[in-house]
Structure formats: C-alpha cells, structure tokens
Image (cartoon, rainbow, N blue to C red):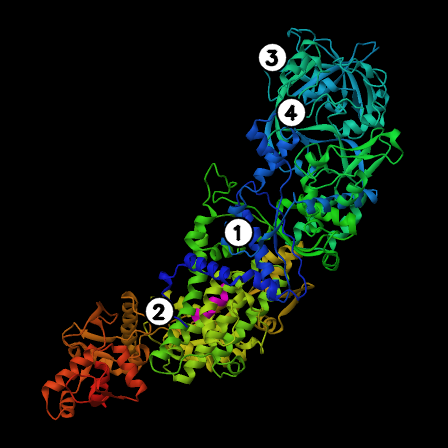
Amino acid sequence: MEDVPEGKDFSFPKQEETILQFWDQIKAFETQLKRSADMPEYIFYDGPPFATGLPHYGHILAGTIKDIVTRYQTMRGHHVTRRFGWDCHGLPVEREIDKKLGIKKKDDVLAMGIDKYNEECRSIVTRYVEEWEKIVTRTGRWIDFRNDYKTMDLKFMESVWWVFAKLYEKGLVYKGFKVMPYSTGLKTPLSNFEAGENYMTVSDPEIMVSFPILGDPDNAAFVAWTTTPWTLPSNLALCVNANFTYVKVRNKYSGKIYVVAESRLSQLPNELQKQSVVNGSINESKAPKTKGSGNKKPDEANAYEVLQKMPGSSLVGTRYEPLFNYFSELAGTAFRVIADNYVTDDSGTGIVHCAPAFGEDDYRVCIENNIITKGEELIVAVDDDGFFISKITDFSGRYVKDADKEIVEAVKVKGRLVKSGSFTHSYPYCYRSHTPLIYRAVPSWFVRVETLKEQLLENNKQTYWVPDYVKEKRFHNWLENARDWAVSRSRFWGTPLPIWISEDGQEIIVVDSIEKLEKLSGAKIFDLHRQNIDHITIPSSRGPEFGVLKRVHDVFDCWFESGSMPYAYLHYPFENTELFEKNFPGHFIAEGLDQTRGWFYTLMVLATALFGKPAFRNLICNGLVLAADGKKMSKSLRNYPSPLEVIDDYGADALRLYLINSPVVRAETLRFKKEGVYCVVKDVFLPWYNAYRFLVQNAKRLELEGAAPFAPIDQASLQKSSNVLDQWIYSATQSLVRFVQKEMDGYRLYTVVPYLLGYLDNLTNIYVRFNRKRLKGRTGEDDCRTALSMLYNVLVISCKVMAPFTPFFTEVLYQNMRKVCEGAEESIHFCSFPHEEGKIEVRIEQSVTRMKTIIDLARNIRERNSKPLKTPLREMIVVHSDEDFLEDIAGKLREYLLEELNVRSLVTSKDILKYATLRAEPDFSGLGKRLGKSMGIVAKEVKSMSQDDILAFERAGEVTIAGYCLKREDIKVVRVFKRPDGRSEKEIDAAGDGDVLVILDLRPDETLFEAGIAREVVNRIQKLRKKVGLEPTDVVEVYYEALDKDSSLEQVLNSQDSYIREALGSPLLRSSLMPPDAIILGEESFSSTASMSVAIRLARPVLVFNSEAILALYQGNAKFAQGLQVYLQSRDHFNLKSEFQLANGQITVSCIEKQPAVTLVLGEHMFLTVGDSTKKRSA
C-alpha cells in the first residue's frame, strides 16, 4: 500500500476527480453492466426531467437515492439497466418559445407555421443536456446518457400511440365537453392535479346582482352572489337548493324587494332611509355610517321586512330577466330557476348564478335541467387566449380578468348591482405561466379513470412506499377522488393524438403504430410530430363518397407521455417484449412528493388500465429541499449555494450523505445548510480516513523495520483470534452488514448513516484507540499482524457496505488496500455486497457497548469533580445485574477500562441495593396516548413500586399494573447512589444511565502520584509530536529537563520508565545526553499538575559511536576511524537502520576510498540512537 497524507492534507474533491478519471479509464459503468448481463434483471424507471433548466438539489437528491439503490441491487447480484430520460414535449418548452418569440395567441403560431414553431421547440429541448451530464456525473451517479430515451423520439412516440389505442380498445377513451381548469397563459386546459400545484392569496371582487322575477306582483328580484363578474355575460340560469327556506323581503328604507335564502338574509346590504338611490342600486361602501356598538348598525336587524317564506323547490321554473342579452336565442330554455344540492348556505345568498361554460357544477346542472343540451354546440364566450369573443359585443377582445371592473360598472349602470366589495382568498394559478386559472368548457379527449377507481386502490395496496404514510394517506386519498383524465391539449409541440375522424363524425380510427398509419394512408412516416402528419388523411372505409378521415389537431398531455414511460422507453410492444413482460411491474422508482399527483399517479392509472397491475413495486418519495431560511430556493434571491460550489468545497460523497441523512428522505422538508455538508466531512469521513491511514502507516512500518511486507491474514483465521476486541469488531462489522442489508432491502436509506456513524465511532475510538500497542507492534510481530489484518478486513468490508452511498471515498480506500490482496476486483463497484460470515457475538457487542457507557459515565464523574484523566484514581466500582457482563468487564475488558480511565483497581458487583436505591418512573409521553384516563392510576402504582418489585420487573422485562402490561420502554428505572456514611461527594461519586451504575473513589493517593506525572509528560510529548507534524512512524529522540532546583522529576520518571517506553516506543532521555549537533524538531516547557516545571525536546536520531572500538578496527589509525564516522553520518538514517536489520545487526563497509574494509557490529561499534547507547550502558 502507498503512503497516504494526513487528513488535513487529503482533498476529498480532488480525490473524487481522480476517481472519475479512473472510472472513465477502465469504463467502470459499462464494465459493470457487461459483467452482470446474465444476472436477474432489476428494473428501475428513471422519471424524465425537462432539460430546459439546470439541475438543482431536488434533482441531485432524487438522483442520489436512485444511484444508491441501483448500485446496491447490482452488488446484490442483479443486472440494473440505468438509462437517463428526458421529458421533451409540452407546455414548459412551448412557454419558453412563446417568451422568446413574443407569441401571445394561438393564431400567432398558426401564422408562423407549426413546422417552424416545433423546430424552435426542438432546438431548446437539449439546451442543458451537457450541463446535466456534467453535474449528474460529478455527483457520482452511474447512468447511461449515451443510450438515453427522449419523449420526442420516434420509437417512444409510437409506443405512446399504442398505449392510447389499447385504452380506446378497452372503451376507456371518450370525447367530452367538460369544464376544466384552464390556463390562459399557456392557452390550454390543465389536469386537476396540475391545477392544484400553485395556489396564491389574492384579492378578488365580490358582488351581489339582482335578477328581476318576471311576472312577480311585488316586482321582486332574485339576488345572486359571485366572485367572478366576468362570467355574468354568460349567465343562463339561477340555482337554488330545494331543501332550503327562502324569503321575499322588503327593505324598509329603499322599498326594494329581494328573494334570498333565509339563512343568508344578513348578507343583504343595510339600505338606510336617508341614502339616495341611484338607478335603483346601492353600493354598501358608500352608505353613511351611524353610531352603534360592535359591528351591527342599530337599524340593521330590522332593515328588512319578511313578506313571504317559501321552500326552494317552489322556486324551480321561475323565470327572470337576463342581465345581458348576448344569449337571447336561448330564452326558450334558459333564464329560469333550477335546483341542486351543490348550493350551500355558508356563503353568498343561497342563490347561485350559473354560467355553464365556466363552472363544472354549472355545466352539470344546466345539462340535467335542459338549459343546454349535451354536446359541442355550447357557445363559450371566451376564446383560447382568455379574451371575450365578438358575440360579447360590449367586452369583445377584452381579457376576462381585466374586464371585471368594466362588467361591475355595467351592472351598476343597469341598476342591478345590489352590493359590491372585495375579499381575499386562496386562488389557483398556473404553475408554469403564473397566470390565474379560469374554469372553461373545452372539448377534450378523456381517459375513464373513475371506472378504474376500485382497481387503482387495490393496486396501490400491492406497492411498497417509503415513507408509507404518503401511500396510505396522500396517494390513497388522491386515488379515492380520482376524476376522468383529460389527456388532450390543443397545442403544437407534443405527441399528436392518433385519432382520425371522418367529416360526418361517424367513422373513427385510432392508429396504434406507424405501420398501420402507413398502410391506411399510403404515406411514408419518418416523424410523428404535427407538422409531419397533420396533412395525412385516411380514405373512408365506406367509400370515396364519404371523403377522408382527418387527424384531430390535439396533442397529448406530456404527463400521458411520462406515464407511458415503462413501455415507451423500451419501444414496447414493438421491441423488447420478453424483457418487459418478464419484469413488469418495475422494481423501483423514486421522485419527489409533488409527483404523488403527477408521475406516480399517471404511472398507476395507465398500468392499471392496460394490465390491471401497478406500474412499480417499490417507491421512495422524498420531500422538498428548501433554502437555509426555510424559503423556496430561488436563483433571483441567491439564497442557496450552487451544487458544484458545495461539491468543489467538500466533495460529492459528503453532499450525498448529508442529503440521505436528513428528513427529506422521509418526504419531509430539508433546510439546506452548507455547513451541514462540512459536518459530514468532519464527523464521518475524517474519522473513517484516519482509521484507514493508521492501518497504512503501521503496515508500512513493518517494512521500514525490516519485517516482511504486510499481507492480510485470511478471514477464517481472523475469526479464531483470541483477542476480545478482535472478536468484537469482527462481530460489529457483521452486524453492520446485516443491518445495512436489512434496511436497504426495506428501502430505508435514512437509517444507514446514523448506524454507520456509530460503527465508525466504535472503529476509531474503541478498536484503533484501545489497540494502538498491538497495531504499532509493541506486543510482538505476530499479534501486530493479526490486529492489522483485522483492521484491514473490517475496513474493506465496511467500504463494500458503504460503496453505494459513498462511491468515491470507498473507491479511494479500496484502490490502495487492494494492492496487498491478490485477486482483488479492479474496482470496489465490481465487488459483491458482503455476506454475513461467522457468528455475530451479541454478548460481546453488548458488553463493549456497556463498556463505552462506563467510560462516558466515569468521564462525567471526573469532569464534575475536576479530576482530569491524567490524574490516576485508586478504584472504580461497576454495578449491574447481568453476571455475563460483569464477567466480561472484570475479565476480557478489564485492562482496557483501567488504562482508558487511568484507574488502578476495578470492582464489580451485582448487588444493586448495596450501592443504590431504585425508583420507577412511568414514561408519560408513550403511555399517555395508550392508557388515556387510566394513566393517573398506572402512574401512581408505578411510582409506588418497591425495590423488590423493580428488581423483579428488570429481571422479567415486564409487569402488569391495573390490567396493563408494561414493558421496559414504558418504565424508567432510576438508580440513586447511596453514598457510604462518613464519605463526602468529593471523596466518592457516582453516575448511572438507568442500566449501569459507576462509582469512583476520588480520594488522593500518594502512591499514584508518580504514575500521574508520567502520564502527563507522555501526553505532552504526544501533543508536541503532532504539533510539529510528525507521523506515527517517524523516529525521534525525546529529551527532558527539570527546570526546578532540587526537583525529584528524574526519580519520578525513572520509576515509570517501563510505562514511558511502552507508551512512546523509546526511552525518555535526560537533556544532558543530547549531542551538541542534534537537530531539534520541537520543544516545549510546561508546569505539571504536581507543580513541576519541565522542558521537553524532540530531536532527530543521532548516531553514537564507540570511538575506542572503531579505532581498534583500524589498528589505531585515527584518520581511518574519523573517515568511517563521517561516512556513516552522511548516510540516510532509515536506510542505514534497514541495512543493519537485513544483515542481522552487522554490516561491512568497503566503499571508502583508500581505506580497508571493516565489519561493524551494531551495539558494539556504534548505536543508531542515543537511547540505544544508554540502554547498553544501563544493561
């Protein structure tokens, strides 16, 4: 393995770019697909985005989810085709061109020519494809851009035709005249799910209008309320509720007589006696104010006199005077009262004005009551662009929303305005053009969704969603209220509807393939867009006299195209029949929460209609990524950093983990914070990297010390290791494998990162930290190789487990580690997902987890009593009821605990009551919901549990109280430390977590004084090594100097010599032994906790010569002896050391010109360090 730099010098982004080059060089993705070609298929559908905009964090999030799942499934033995898709047609593209070319009306397009317009659309469809590929590739996602699919491709469009033709064959297609949400900005109707995408709070006019009753003896008038004055010119009926009571009332001051619902009488304006009446109309806002209390005027309650009460049913058929005369030709059937239960009394007057062309319920009730007849002959007073047609003479050519004020004024002039004002409410806007939607009757082609409702609900049950509540609530509710789907758009850039109709409407042909169209028409087809097929006709099968069939002008809603994707991207059924039919429904899709009413819905509808199945089996639904301030990410506001900026700073892997380890993967919102990505680097990647670097350093050290190069021991042998931490980390790694596999099989990506964090914490802070002596070779070479092999093994396994999540970093580590493993795969992404091997040691894992708890509790005790770790303590008592755990703590784990906590003695006890009193407390938050009113009784009994009751509960794991079975999670057991009599808190203290109780003896002990000094000095030396940038494998000599007169420091350090040598790997030398030519690398002075002033210095190793022995080699020739010493001092220290090691401690020097060859013996003629020479002398 090659050397690796310190974490601070390791650039994650630059390493990722190197890995991208490596993948490109070995054609990693293509190779992976080829290698897995014969494996079972795992079908993934990639929802197509529009390439007319750049990718944002929402795309990166969804792409990361898709990449993780598909990489994992590949490692699990599947062949996973990943083809990128592009949504090319539809309103977003047309909107761009309309803005570019200044197109305002549909006639502008026709004047320009559909061919030119569509070519303009085609030209921008792939505008940002290169940017998409660059960003998606940089995030580490493996997906095929070369073999992508586009909804504008001929093959894709042909399959869309087939889908529609199949629906037509099944009787699921019809042409209707339906009032639909309509975008005047886009000049097209929208689906119900599109209409609900963008609501805005707006202020709209609200008016009451009078409709005089024809032939009424009192000259009464119906009063209707509306918030859309622009619909009044199209009024054809008034609708009441047959079950309501209506009243005829006279205003005592104006004499006006009105008919309204009794429950809405208070909504009529208060017309006071002194108010002048202009043209018989009253504007409430101009009425004079009178004094009074609250909101009621004194005369308001008695302003109206009730002349008559009547049921709503009695009003049906009553005729009234039209407001405008634009539809006078319908006077025979229109301008009369009808009844329906959709009229409510929670707003307005209980009388609804009906304009059947502009209201869904209006259209329905007018059809049912024969105001109009069903069909296309309904005159719609507003054109496709939202302007009044010429028939509406007074407002012709005016945009409807702009005409509201003029219409209100016209009503006022006619003397028909009863009341006017404005109100604020939530109103639907077009999610593309951001213009207000209107409801407008349009002829459209529909898919019968309502007839499929039960099957849709059943198919939804067969799918698996993460999170499941989106499926069970949001999506289920949407399906329950599903309406027939208008799939046609009267637009230009899209897949044309394959419907040809005769002039008399009696003959309809729905074409399902290019071959069929060519056969029927005799034309050669090379493209299916409008400009290439609108002119194609089909001769009538009834004979020439019936003329030809012409194609309807509509194109498909682009949602129909994306919903057809499972079939169309494979060009099914024209190609890939076996591949599709063996693997449908697809295994996996993933998109954002907004697709609940979009792609998820259209996929489900079409698959159910075609095959009676859902389109997918598994789905991950992500939430919305917001800016840090909680607002929507906005380019204009610049309230978020660009994705490439974040990747260039911290790397794509860090961004991937940040997104995956957030609420957004559970369909909640995420406030994106760049510093959160940095925390992933700090908390995940740096500890992981440092564990890997420690392995490489110590593997290299073996070679530096002349031992055989590191080669990992096989896994079977490692499982037999007797070291408890080897057993533990091996088991913990197998638990990691099991956990990640289980969670990934359940598509719960968000649970993996927290578990990985815990694993890495265990690896670095327990295994590596507690095993430093073994890993550094201080316990012998064989034990060192076992420890290094175990570390190597768990790093390789954890990298394979995490490869789908962090493809770059795991590849970096793997590429270096594979160099010592013969037969390793060329890339980590060619490896299989690890299998569990060997037994998972639950007991030892639990014991080490509890050991970590003991360490944390003991550190808390030290901190609160100002006892730093460098201060040795005499005793620690661990109290727990589990004998196996106490046995592990007192046996296998004892030395690790004592050394880590700097305690001299460890006592274990299972006699909890000797050291603590127990108190039981109910978990109110959990139990409250379950127990309801019984909570008080249960809580009282839990709190009154005796010591024996609590112990019995802990042994059994459950207890029955007041008829309820309570488990461990329902009751918290608190251990209250019983301090021994006569002992203060400063002398003995304890801490517990409800499971383990830790007690520390804090009394000072002179016998521990010297050990504390030595530990502190060693700690200072280690910090100084790090400060001057030394690697753990760098050899230095350490010198100390007592700065106090009459200091006992030397005596103290000599007494701790064995501990110091073991900790440092070398002796601690008096400063008087430092040669004058020594090169000092760093020095520091400090005062110890024992008030001893010390100076420490780090110096490069210096050769020490036995001058007499060397002189003897040359028979007393001082010149030769001097020449040998100069030569040796010029040699590289490391190389010289290696040469001696390889030659078993002696070398022959024969290269000095004009000097005889001599053989040097290490330890006799010279020493490699001052420390070696003092060791010899002391020996």
Give whichever of discs 2 and 4 has the lower sequence position.
4
Give whichever of discs 2 and 3 has the lower sequence position.
3
Q: Nearer the viewer, mark 3 or mark 4?
A: 4
User: Which residue is identified by label 3?
Assistant: 286
Task: Answer few, some or many: residues within 10 Å of disc 1's Cα (few below 14, many 20 plus, some between 14 and 19).
Answer: some
Give whichever of discs 1 and 4 has the lower sequence position.
4
Q: Nearer the viewer, mark 2 or mark 4?
A: 4
Write the residue at 66% across / 31% down: 114
Task: Answer few, some or many: residues within 10 Å of disc 4's Cα (few below 14, many 20 plus, some between 14 and 19).
Answer: few
Mark 2 in CB contact with mark 4 (< 8 angstroms): no
Mark 2 in CB contact with mark 1 (< 8 angstroms): no
Above or below, 443 against 393 in this view is below
Q: Nearer the viewer, mark 2 or mark 3?
A: 3
| Amino acid at circle 3 | Lys
Residue 1167 in view (yes/no): yes
User: Which residue is identified by label 4?
Assistant: 111
Above or below, 423 against 56 in this view is above
Magenta-highlighted residues: 757-765
Write the residue at 66% across / 29% down: 187
